[in-house]
Image (tube, grey):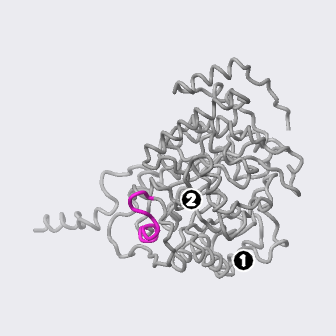
Amino acid sequence: MVDRTVPGPTDASVRRALHRAASGRALDVDEAAALLAARGGALDELLDVAGAVRDAGLREAGRPGVVTYSKKVFIPLTRLCRDRCHYCTFATVPHRLPAAFLDRDEVLAIARAGAAQGCKEALFTLGDRPEERWPAARQWLDERGYDSTLDYLRACAVAVLEETGLLPHLNPGVLSWSELQRLKPVAPSMGMMLETTATRLWSEPGGPHFGSPDKEPAVRLRVLDDAGRVGVPFTTGILIGIGETPAERVDAIFAIRRAHREYGHLQEVIVQNFRAKPDTAMRGMPDAELRDLAATVAVARVLLGPKARIQAPPNLIAGEYDLLLRAGIDDWGGVSPLTPDHVNPERPWPQIDELARHTEKSGFTLRERLTIYPEYVRAGDPWLDPRLLPHVGALADPATGLAVEAARPVGRPWQEPDETYGGRTDLHATIDTTGRTGDRRGDFDHVYGDWAEVAGKVTAG
């Protein structure tokens, strides 16, 4: 990769940007990038500003001082992937796996074990469209009657809802608009990390995303917009320390802000620090420094505002809980008492009691949420498909939208809509994708009768 090291901002530019942030003024890319370099006393001031913004948002949300998490199980539906990210240990090759996918019984066994321990989220993580690269994945799906990985994912999500009552959160990677529509009825929330908007990290040989078709920033930005159009409560975020410049890092945060301002669907923004892993192409890269992570979280908080829900994974921060809370996070993400973090298997999640102690030590209260954030639980339509209302309602506090911590998931029926319903159900999709193509409804004759035939009878009469 080309060395893109640029001179850092001057102390004066950092102070100027810090003053503007403290005054509540809008920051441009250069000012926000300057704040990423804040260290020492300047970093402390930046964290104070960001923490105040976060605190105002929690008060406005009616839960002052509350930091949330989701109690989950991690279901690695398949570790095969068509991409070749240079830092990833989750994706592997077929001969290293007992099977291309977990079968349905394995999925349900994980979910049932989680339900028995009070988990409420089933996090489905999987590689992007492995059947397009690996014949073993294509064969596995064909033998079981599934056209695609996404069809199998949907079937497993329905099974988890019906058999265990856990709420699926789906991370299948890049999705089309129609795929988002098809998955929305089986999952209260979905997610995909934006990671970066730096196209060169995808297009240039040696870049971390080179050879990974699903990591093209333009493609991932389109997914963010399509998720908003479909009304999916969506989790996204950035991955720092993979070779991006400060300006490129800030540009990704601005892109997330733009998408949320337009559609209001980004329920959570993750700021994740790169940690080098053995047996990867990037094993020799230095880890993202924790002060850099804190500065990035704080800048994200300032740019995204008080209503944003910002998370930093607690198993990647080397015990620096207070630092990240000072920086403006208000959520610890999904934490499992049962399953490992299959994406970062070398870094186990903290015990929930331990996480609560660290959170309380910093002056906050830890509360459990569902996979769908409380604002979207309380809003209901259009964010939550009616078929999921019984499942979510059984676990949510109607007053706050947070989880009822004593509630235990129980399987409930999930049902496709009645195929005999006669309404025009495709109108929104047709208009959005094709536009209006005529001066009347496509089902005009079906609803109102064949007017040509009526006219003929009148003439004959």
Q: Which sits in the foreground, 4 or 166? A: 166
Q: Is residue 158 left or right of residue 345?
A: left
Q: Nearer the viewer, residue 252 or 403?
A: 403
Residue to which mark 1 is pinned = 140
Image location (x, y in percent) of residue 109: 65, 80
Instruction: Identify which residue is drawn at 72% across, 47% down.
Output: 320
Which residue sits at x=62%, y=60%? Answer: 334
**Callout 2 environment at 10 Å: few (<14), some (14 to 19), or many (20+)?**
many
Tell me if residue 220 can be seen. Answer: no
The Cα atoms of the two marked residues, 2 and 1, are separated by 25 Å
Residue 424 percent location from the top left of the image: 34, 63
Q: Position of residue 89 (x, y in %)?
A: 80, 59
For badge 2, the amino acid type reads Met
Quadrant in which the N terminus is drawn? top right
- In this picture, which residue range is highlighted in magenta? 389-401
Q: Amino acid at mark 1?
A: Trp
Q: Residue furthest left?
A: 461
Residue 173 in which image quadrant: bottom right
- For residue 447, above or below residue 218: below
Q: Is residue 239 rendered to the left or right of residue 208?
A: left
* Quarter where residue 200 is shown: top right
Residue 190 disc label: 2
Q: In what element is the residue under mark 2?
A: strand
Q: Quadrant of the C terminus?
A: bottom left
Q: Position of residue 431 (x, y in %)?
A: 41, 52
Tell me if I can see residue 391 in this picture.
yes
Looking at the image, is 247 positioned above or below residue 393? above
Q: Is residue 63 above or below residue 147?
A: above
| Residue depicted at x 31% and y 51% | 439
Residue at 75% over, 66% down:
80
Number of residues whose C-alpha sits closer than 10 Å to that of mark 1, classed few (under 14), some (14–19) or many (20 or more): some
